[in-house]
Amino acid sequence: MSAVGFLLVDANVLVDYQSGGLGILSLVSQHVGPVYVVSTVLAEVDGLDEWECERLGLHVVEPTLAQATEAAPPNGRLSFQDRTCVVVCRDNGWTCVSNDKALRRACGGVGVAVRWGLELMLDLVEGGHLPVETADDAAERIHRANPVFLSARILEAFREKLAALH
């Protein structure tokens, strides 16, 4: 498992792990790297608040005025929340965890490292912090809740990576 530093998760990853198990993000924060959520991103996610994030060991961060101002002007397909993720990650040297292709491209354009949401579970399995079966079950629940974006093909590729770690 490679060191990844601080991680900033976007709304789609939070929603996925609501289906798969938010406790997994708590394990990520303990064993892979501190997990951050921008406050404006958290506001987009129903059923998750700052108190719950704190309980899970996730850190809610407020963008600075300069960061919010930079992220404010519309820019292509990215929402204000996505643009804020890019700016906060860039300014802090953090890795952006997202399954959104436009956000990942924007991050790459300014030198921000990116990770897929499911990759976090691979890190945990590789480090011995999450059983393969638990990761597989979580990925299946995410797929069932979000089959358009976590397709059967993506799920199968994830399972192949899990099997390689087993």
Image (cartoon, rainbow, N blue to C red):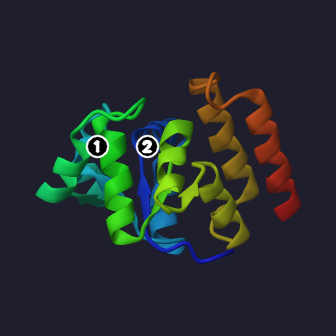
Q: Is residue 147 left or right of residue 37?
A: right
The answer to whether one can see residue 166 in this image is no
Of 131 and 162, the residue lying toward us = 162
Disc 2 crowd rating (10 Å Cα; few below 14, some 14-19, many 20+) is many
Question: On the image, numbered disc 2 is attached to which residue?
Answer: 14
The kind of secondary structure element at disc 1 is helix
Report if the CB atoms under discs 1 and 2 are less than 8 Å apart: yes
Of 78 and 126, the residue lying toward us = 78
Instruction: Residue at 40% x, 31% y: name it.
Output: 76
Quadrant, the C terminus = bottom right
Query: Disc number at residue 42?
Result: 1
Instruction: Residue at 41% x, 58% y: name it.
Output: 8
Instruction: Residue at 28% x, 52% y: name it.
Output: 38
Return the x and y of residue 14 as percentages of the image width and height: 43, 43
Disc 1 crowd rating (10 Å Cα; few below 14, some 14-19, many 20+) is many
Tag 1: amino acid: Leu
